[in-house]
Amino acid sequence: MWAVMTVVVIFEFSVGATLGKGLNRGIATLLGGGLGVVAHRLASFAGEKPESIILGLSVFLIASVVTFARFFPKMKARYDYGLLIFILTFSLISVSGYREEVVLDMAHRRLSTVLIGGSATIFICIFICPTWAGEDLHKLTAANMEKLGAFLEGFGRVYFPEPNDGNLENKMLKDEYKSVLNSKAIEDTLTPLEMREKIKEPCVKMSSECSYALRELAVWIEMMTCSLTADIHVVKAKASAKKLKAQLKTGLWPDTDLLDIVPAVTVASLLIEIVSCTVKIADSVHELALLSKFKMPNAKMTKQLSLERVVSGTFSIEGSHNVNIIVE
């Protein structure tokens, strides 16, 4: 029975989760059973009458301590299942009976059946159609970066449309940036057209270059191969961000009400922050590539990539929200 229950409770979708739950159950069963036998043996030395009192106190004290330990966030996140099994096993073994041979036999049967069920589950999970969480995380990270790149491309094209774009609402990119488009109608009515035209070029450049960079980095992660393209797009996005910040600080709208330009400035400020976040993502992917030893196309490519990183310097953009707008 315990073997069947072990298979039911520790079987998870991924190999890592099954191993973690199996180790939790195995170690908790071993410790709980061993401590239960020790508590029963010590209580038996006190005599027949006080034995039940000592066993009751030991169960109460140990179960209380372990139960309160489950309330700590770190313990609950990683060892909650193991602590629960420890309480159940200790209580079951220590109060199962007063005869020592019965206690030892029950502890032995519980531990052996748990090991049998856990071993069978781990064998099936590893060798029969295994699912590795690391592989899923690898693909999910690349897919999320691809979606983020599609979002930035769509945002730039919709907020600053071109005459030949046509109706973008029916295109595939719509679903990737739908949440941003919810506020588009209000911003269109509040923002002066001349204001949008003045910041259109750097904003579109930032969104498109960030999109290209993120999609290239997604390919990096998916293929585990480095290239120069992502760094080039990041440098171009950084240059556009600096250009936009310079435009916002010069005060090019002397006859414009400050409240009218707030929506456009908000979009510009967010795009600058997006560039900063893209830079951080690029640096993280570079660090991942170094630690995971991503493949380089060839030696010439590697040398050129290192030179590009040195020439471009640090990618971080400081004070992305510290934009002073001068309106005379």
Image (cartoon, rainbow, N blue to C red):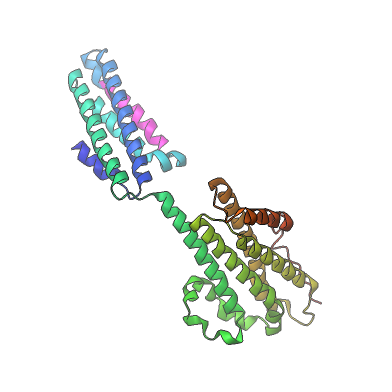
Residue 76, relative to residue 101: is it above or below? below
Q: Is residue 68 magenta?
A: yes
Residue depicted at 80% across the width and 80% down the height = 254
Residue drawn 28% across and 31% down? 89
Residue at x 20%, y 28% (from the top left corner): 109
In this rendering, position of residue 239 left or right of residue 43:
right
Q: Quadrant of residue 42?
A: top left
Is any part of residue 99 visible from this angle? no
Q: Pick out the residue farthest to the front.
A: 299
Q: Nearer the viewer, residue 223 or 107?
A: 223
Establish if 27 lies above or below 230.
above
Horizontal and vertical percent for residue 266? Answer: 65, 71
Q: How many marks do you count on the picture?
A: 0
Identify the image quadrant of the C terminus: bottom right
Q: Is residue 74 magenta?
A: no
Find residue 95 and report its horizontal and vertical position in percent.
Answer: 23, 26
Tell me if residue 21 comes above or below residue 297 in the rendering: above
Classified by dominant secondary structure, the portion drawn in magenta counts as helix
Q: Relative to 284, is 113 above or below?
A: above
x and y, in percent, of residue 31 in the image = 33, 27
Q: Is residue 92 left or right of residue 185?
A: left
Left or right, residue 199 beside residue 120: right
On screen, residue 250 versus residue 76, left or right, reads right
Q: Is residue 9 visible?
A: yes
Quadrant occupied by the N terminus: top left
Question: From which residue to which does the magenta span run?
Answer: 53-70
- For this rendering, which residue is in front, 105 or 151? 151
Q: Position of residue 24 (x, y in %)?
A: 35, 36
Quarter assignment of residue 274: bottom right
Q: Residue at x 25, y 30 (%)?
A: 111
Nearer to the camera, 275 or 131: 131
Q: Quadrant of residue 79?
A: top left
